[in-house]
Image (cartoon, coloured by chain):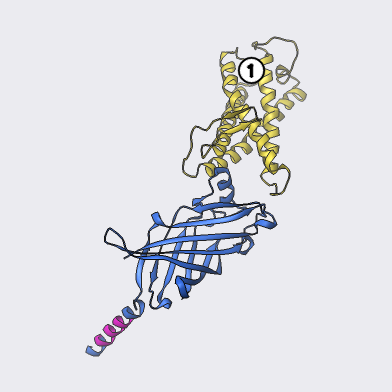
Amino acid sequence: MKKQLLASSLALALGFAASNVHAADYAIDTAHSSVIFKIQHLGYSWLYGSFDEFSGEFSYDNADSSASSIMVNINPNSINSNHAERDKHLKSGDFLDVSKFKEASFKSTSFEQKEDGMAVLMGDLTIRGISKSVTIDVSKIGEGKDPWGGERVGFAGETKFKLTDFDIPMNLGPASEEVTIILNVEGVKK
Amino acid sequence: MRLGNSESRYGLISQLFHWVFAITIIALFALGTYMVDLTYYDSWYQSAPWWHKSFGAILLLLVLPRFIWKALSVRVKPLASDPPLQQKAAHAAHMLLLLLLVTVLISGYLISTADGRSIEVFAWFSLPASVTGLPDQATRAGLVHEYAALALVILAGLHGLAALKHHFINKDKTLLRMLPGKD
């Protein structure tokens, strides 16, 4: 009985230690974060839009980058390109099919710190129910105390992929096959 | 031909309203069905919705005058040869046609004006937005627009078939009352 108790408390302690090496957990502050996309229009200009509803959290440890991870859930129905008729089209079966696929997400699988605050974040991006591995180039913007007693850290990341990677059926022409996603994430330490 | 209705036939104004709406509705339905499947590089991709919205806006603006005219006009009496139940059914179908018409026009307007943009009507004038920013307004109004338009065209088709049945099978004056001619 005693042995068992010792073993289980040891396991608990180890488990606690393993999940909590040095990394701190952060909640994404959506008021200071954004999920933006840009895509070329006919090859003549950039069209920018955003996903206005998302949430998530991340763990970050600047000493041991392998302990860092992030999870973001995005509501595809919150797509906003500053044009209601276009947004209606983007939500339809031609693009995101939001009545069928109510969630999009990104879940990291690895985080590798480079010099000068740059990092490479890899993970699974899920759009239209399809998960694909993507690589996001990340730069740390800043870290430290905020004026209200909290601690914050912020990153910007960018990745691009083909619309066809996620079975988006609409063909926007040869200059618009790829979309770039830009993530601006600020976290508040829990 | 008289301008106003009599108890036995529709006058010129009512007939004009009826046929202008009928032809425009069928054309808008065909154009609307065609335009939503255009590919991005199609030369009609910009112009088809522009024509669709322009004509739709005109109908929307004509609805109120049409209803006022209807309210002020002499009511054309059903043919005595029609059984009472059929008269009631016909009246209900006509009311439903008008209800669907208003639903289609307003929902269409709410799609294009969902974010406060106005609708450009034939580069002639703009129809301003009024109700904007309802949750998911464009998508929801779009769904209503699509199904109400389908229902409208199906019911209008039955309405047309019924008129032809009256004309060719019953050989009565139902259809003639909505066409130019004498009492």
Query: Bounds of the magenta span?
Result: A5-14
Q: Is residue B22 left or right of residue A145?
A: right
Q: Residue at x 28, y 58 (%)?
A: A147
Viewer-proximal residue among B137 and B101: B137
- Most common secondary structure along the magenta stretch: helix
Q: Is residue B59 left or right of residue A186?
A: right
| Residue B111: image location, x then y, percent | 56, 39
| Quarter of the image where one finds residue B159 | top right
Which residue bears the numbered disc 1? B78
Q: Hey, which residue is sitting farthest right in the picture? A: B168
| Residue B74: image location, x then y, percent | 60, 12
Quarter of the figure that contains the N terminus of chain A: bottom left
| Residue B56: image location, x then y, percent | 63, 31
Q: Amino acid at mark 1?
A: Pro
Q: Colour of chain B?
A: yellow
Viewer-proximal residue among A106 and B142: A106
- As for residue A132 lying within the magenta part, the answer is no
Q: Colour of chain A?
A: blue
- Is residue A157 at least partly visible in the picture? yes
Viewer-proximal residue among B125 and A144: A144
